[in-house]
Amino acid sequence: MDWGWIGRNLDLIGGRVLEHVALTAPPIVIGLVLSIPLGYWASRSRVARSILLVLGNIVYTIPAIALLVLVPVLLGGAILDPVNLVIALTLYALALMVRSAADAFAAVPHDVVSSATSIGYSAWQRFFAVELPLAGPVLLAGIRVVSVSTVSLASVGALTGIENLGSFFIDAFQRQFLTEALVGIVAVLVVAAVFDVVLQLLGRLLMPWNRRNRRAAENPALLRTPPIGGVA
Amino acid sequence: MIFVQAIAWILDGGHWVGRAGAGNPAILQRLGETLGISVISVAIAVVIAVPLGVLIGHTGRGRLVAILASNVARALPTLGLLSILLLLIGINAVPIAIVLVLLGIPPMLAGAYAGVEAVNRDTIDAARAVGMTEWQIVVRVELPLAASLLVGGFRATVLQVIATTTVASAFAFGGFGIYLINGLAQNDFVQMLAGAILVTVLCLLIDGALAVVQRLVAPRAFPAARRIRLRRRRAAGHSGPRPSRGRGPSRKVCSHEEDLQRRDRGHRRDGGDRPDARRVRQLEEPERRRIGWR
């Protein structure tokens, strides 16, 4: 372990941390935002549910490194553009998140929804004032899982020359320099932990009522069997 | 058009055979490398994870271990794990296989424990009540009922391992990922895309095959129950399928019918508080209903 190297390369480490955050934050946010309407749709229609889940399963079956190349070819972009990584990570995030969102909306008690309808809520009002808040804790649990896996997965992008924390692993291997690889892995874990703390704080801020029975909602997404797929 | 070129690249017979070298992608050799290390790693992961997962599911203890394992595997970057182990152990297949096993264990563990845990407690209690040993309960009740989720875990493990081999290609391991690495180094996008297509097709094929297996092993409660019922009826001297009876819970009718037959042959099972069977059989249907004999 060469501590001096860390001191000398703080700029490089800081820069790559920022790159990593810039590449992983958008997929998590976009994945969450898009999964809400898709998940709601899936919770309403069995056909939609099976179509979306099968699509998600197929996406999750494709290894990341292959999807990184397939995305620009199918969407017509440049093959080495960092945007490809953002799109690929968004697809993975959606593949995981739509299932969570569908479960979240399906778990909203039927009586509550009927009550809201009967006291005169319109469909939109009911969605934003009743269903979305009640689905919130499960959505939060799902997005926490997505956040951790997105941060770890983004490092694969380094293989196609997209600079991020994963670049440390390639450099370390080529230079036979263990310290660099350890720095990279710790940095990935720290970024994931920070994201998780931010998500939890946001959850408390947006859903203050949820604090007391937090244990009950303690990540049901983690207890479920993982989705079929590799990604790596 | 790069897509067409990539398909042509894959369909080129010369690209499949021979040893890998300058200008020869040797797809068959790469396929062999990928599958070889994957089979070994998956086998080791299964041997470790299935007994552990079944134990956790059966006893209900150590659930935290399974959850923790899958969280750690999710958080650790594959690339980092590979580079660290290769630097520590040396550049050969052993550290790569270790990483594949480590990443393959959590999904299998989760599938095994979730499958066993999901078995209805009443069913297990019933098995215990009829005198099955713990071992018999695991092997004859829990495993068959958990089969679908077990295969699901296996499916996830296999795909995880294959996906990881593509990343391992960056570290002096062959496999399909090599086309992406080499293609990038040589600015040969056709080769990159061909590699991506090959990996994707391989994963989808394996996933599809295992999905079929998963469906086949899923316990089908009704057909099995029906088969057992028919077997019993045949053992009781009844031949051929039971005549259709329209509405109503057929099972109840069936068991009473069995009773009737047993009585015909001189069995006396009940205390005798039922209506006389022979007389009932001569009654018309509405009359039978009236006395509560369905």
Image: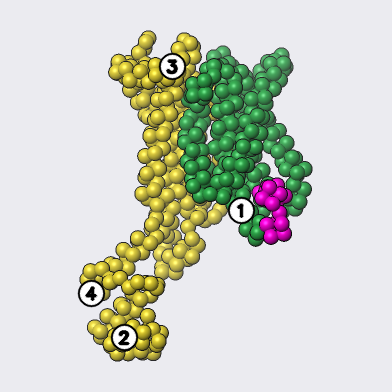
Chain colours: A green, B yellow
Distance of label 1 from label 4 (alpha carbons)? 50 Å
What secondary structure predominates along the stretch shown in magenta?
A: helix
Image side of residue B202 versus residue B109, left or right: left
SS at mark 2 in the image: loop
Q: Residue at label 4? A: B237
Give the image location of residue B224, x and y in percent.
35, 61
Residue under the image location 72 percent in, 16 percent down: A11
Question: Callout 3: 10 Å neighbours few (<14), some, many (20+)?
Answer: few
Q: Amino acid at mark 2?
A: Glu
Q: Residue at label 1? A: A107
Q: Residue at label 2? A: B284
Q: Quadrant of residue B22?
A: top left
Frontmost of labels 1 and 4 is 1
Q: Amino acid at mark 1?
A: Ala
Q: Residue at label 3? A: B2
Callouts 1 and 3 in the same chain: no
